[in-house]
Image: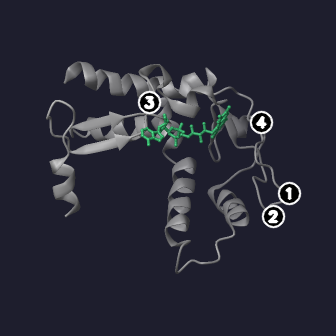
Amino acid sequence: MREERIADCKGDGGVEYEAIVVGAGLAGLVAAAEIADAGKTVLLLDQEPEASIGGQAWWSFGGLFLVDSPEQKRMGIKDSKELAWQDWLGAAGFDREQDEDYWGKKWAEAYVDFAAGEKRAWLASMGIRFFPVVGWAERGGYLAEGHGNSVSRFHIVWGTGPGIVAPFERRVRAHMKAD
Ligand SMILES: Cc1cc2nc3c(=O)[nH]c(=O)nc-3n(C[C@H](O)[C@H](O)[C@H](O)COP(=O)(O)OP(=O)(O)OC[C@H]3O[C@@H](n4cnc5c(N)ncnc54)[C@H](O)[C@@H]3O)c2cc1C
């Protein structure tokens, strides 16, 4: 049923799309870029004019969550996937794992894996670089048993918010030119 509905989706000019992404903030740009790179047709919609592309991320500080990065090591920060997961659990307080927390916990696990694994290299492959001083956002209670990041993990992208939006916007625009 779902596949049929997606296949039936039509844009203004009667063109059919395999996917429609609503919102050209960072999440929408990433999704649209990945879908288009996979060879699918995608319609990216936003209620705002084109000048607002990137949404909140354009205005943001561009601080990204990375775990056990070279920047942290250079500053002598001892981090690991296990510690990040412990911190995440302390903040999330998942207590309905068979119910509404089920997918939230799965998503969190995948995200911590990503942040401790391929995330930095994936961003670097698009030209994203980081300020060498790692910040400490969402510190919580400062301790590994409590909520929040027990070590610094806030990696600021060179160029801040516009610096994180630009590569994804470029990828999306390249498909607009090509198609
Ligand atoms: C000043 C500031 C600083 C920040 N700094 C950081 C930081 O350093 N690190 C960090 O991790 N996070 C930071 N954040 C938060 C981060 O920027 C956001 O969480 C993130 O950018 C959200 O991205 P998004 O694509 O999910 O949503 P959004 O950026 O909100 O994008 C959603 C898009 O959907 C569109 N839309 C909504 N409803 C509809 C609709 N019905 N139809 C069509 N379009 C619609 C909107 O117009 C918008 O363009 C900051 C935020 C702000 C405002």
Q: Position of residue 22 (x, y in %)?
A: 38, 41
Front one among 18 and 107: 18
On-image quarter of the N terminus = bottom left
Pointer 4 with pointer 1, Cβ within 8 A: no
Q: Residues within 10 Å of mark 4 (few under 14, many from 20)?
A: few
Q: Residues within 10 Å of mark 3 (few under 14, many from 20)?
A: few
Tell me what residue is drawn at x 18 percent, y 40 percent: 10
Pointer 2 with pointer 1, Cβ within 8 A: yes
Distance CA(mark 4)–CA(mark 3): 23 Å
Label 4: state its secondary structure.
loop
The residue pinned by badge 1 equals 141
Label 3: state its secondary structure.
loop
The residue pinned by badge 3 equals 125
Distance CA(mark 1)–CA(mark 3): 35 Å
The residue pinned by badge 4 equals 75
Distance CA(mark 4)–CA(mark 2): 23 Å
